[in-house]
Image (cartoon, rainbow, N blue to C red):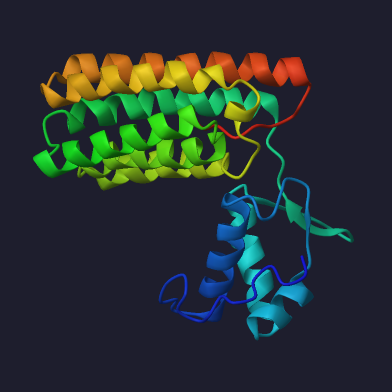
Amino acid sequence: MSGLFSGIGPGALGNWVTKADRAHGVIRQAILSGQLAPDDPINPKRIAEELGMSIIPIREALRRLEQEDLVVIRPHVGASVRAIPVTEVSENFLIRSALEALAAELAAERLTHADLEKLEELMARMDRCVATRRYSDFAKTNRRFHQTIYDAVGEQSLVRLIKTQWDRTSGRTSVYSVVPERAISAQEEHRQIFDALKRGDAAAAGRLMREHMLKARSVHAAAMAGRGERSLETAN
């Protein structure tokens, strides 16, 4: 935990309304980025010292993070990063397959030329990641690819639901370091989704996105069962 938040200034991660908002933001970012791993203890006093504030807003932030299922607070023990059970990861994929299929259908009719160019650029970047076996970078770029599609939807409630599901399982060990060939097949699926989006075929885009997510779910389930791990990052 030492120095985890060093160098993060008051406005580095946003213009927070309160100190609790800022504490929530920096702790949340540390969890989602993997700086804080599952089951890692969270020391409110140390964070308060690093952020230059009292312990009260830190505790408020941790309660909010507990409500978001990112933190566990145990009486007489303290706070720690919540580990994600295998069954919950599988359920997460199932939920996302439905939400993201709907978003892809809507996006097919709303993506601009600039959006499509950005998607092509991101696919090229993922190709380079596959070629150089940079699977962690692939996972990050993959999320940007999906987010670019969903940002074009315009249905903010739907986009928030998708983002919430992504965030619940972020910051874990990437499945691409365990099953690297998944990155290759995922890229082919990305191209098929992109082609459907480019031609404005909403039905095909939705169907392909659902299949993409369900295939990712199967790969993750097999990888986790094989390694006997409780959680893996749900990069698809």
Residue 59 lies left or right of residue 175; in this view the side is right
User: Against 45, is 81 above or below?
Assistant: above
Quadrant the N terminus occupies: bottom right
Residue at horizontal 65 percent and vertical 32 percent from the top: 232
Residue at horizontal 53 percent and vertical 80 percent from the top: 9
User: Residue at the front extreme?
Assistant: 132
Residue 139 percent location from the top left of the image: 49, 36
Residue at horizontal 31 percent and vertical 45 percent from the top: 157
Instruction: Write down the quadrant of residue 224 in the picture.
Output: top right
User: Against 34, is 137 above or below?
Assistant: above
Residue 14 lies left or right of residue 154; in this view the side is right
Q: How many marks?
A: 0
Compare residues 51 and 179 and report the one nearer the observer: 179
Q: Is residue 236 visible?
A: no
Residue 150 lies left or right of residue 179; in this view the side is left
Residue 54 lies left or right of residue 40; in this view the side is left
Instruction: Write down the quadrant of residue 192 in the picture.
Output: top left
Residue 90 percent location from the top left of the image: 58, 22
Q: Is residue 36 visible?
A: yes
Residue at horizontal 21 percent and vertical 14 percent from the top: 204
Compare residues 205 and 72 and report the one nearer the observer: 205
